Image: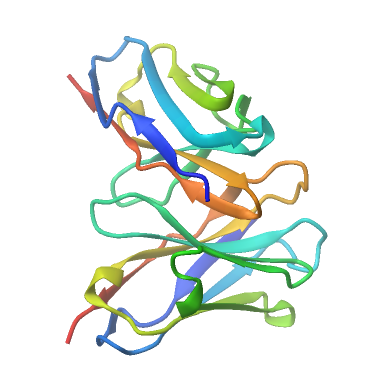
Amino acid sequence: QITLKESGPTLVKPTQTLTLTCTFSGFSLSTSGVGVGWIRQPPGKALEWLALIYWDDDKRYSPSLKSRLTITKDTSKNQVVLTMTSMDPVDTATYYCARRCQSVTTAYFDYWGQGTLVTVSS
Amino acid sequence: EIVLTQSPGTLSLSPGERATLSCRASQSVSSSYLAWYQQKPGQAPRLLIYGASSRATGIPDRFSGSGSGTDFTLTISRLEPEDFAVYYCQQYGSSLYSFGQGTKLEIK
């Protein structure tokens, strides 16, 4: 059974750095083709892809947020960490982590965490 | 960066009717890299379709996907009450991912 769960602060102040952790089970991030990504969703708005890290430590970022994001993995702990600097109220959103499918010939997110709501406010 | 535009923004239909949702890409997308998700209030998105036309595990056969190039379609043949939700398309291209802005399917 594959599960993912996000954890981190529910409230951050403007200009602070957000650190979110995705803890997963049921698969290994050392398996070829596998990746874990972060996607966010402001209240009442659409999904926005942020970043993804692959089994081989290749990392990809949304061009519009690249300068503010860092994604890392700890394979031994089954965790992926996302940091986002210079937080602003517009970054208020539910942040999801999700598993990228194992196949290298297609690309979709097959398992998702429940999401964690992060509010940016002073 | 590929931009996905979904239409209509809101679709009002009755149970039993057929729903057709559109996803248009700003440049060509490989069919292998186009997926659809369903999201209900307070829940995480659920994968429906991958590879443009393959149903994910456990997805009823009333859901089908089609299309190629820049135009893709999600069709729900006969709407059930549980199908009223928001639907997103997602693509992978040039090593990046993106989602459409969503179509809300509401009960008429």
- Percent coordinates x, y for residue A116 in the rendering: 37, 68
- Tell me the quarter of the picture where residue B21 sits: top left
- Tell me the quarter of the picture where residue A14 sits: bottom left
- Residue at position x 35%, y 19% in the image: B80
In the displayed orientation, state which residue is furthest to the right: A32
Asked whether, in this view, residue B57 is left or right of residue B82, the answer is: right
Q: Check the image and report above or below for A67 versus A110.
A: below
- Percent coordinates x, y for residue B46 in the rendering: 48, 43
Does residue A20 appear anywhere in the picture? no
- Percent coordinates x, y for residue B86 in the rendering: 33, 37
Asked whether, in this view, residue B88 is left or right of residue A60, the answer is: left
- Residue at position x 73%, y 67% in the image: A29
Asked whether, in this view, residue A58 is left or right of residue A62, the answer is: right
- Residue at position x 24%, y 14% in the image: B14
| Image quadrant occupied by the N terminus of chain A | bottom right
Does residue A101 appear anywhere in the picture? yes
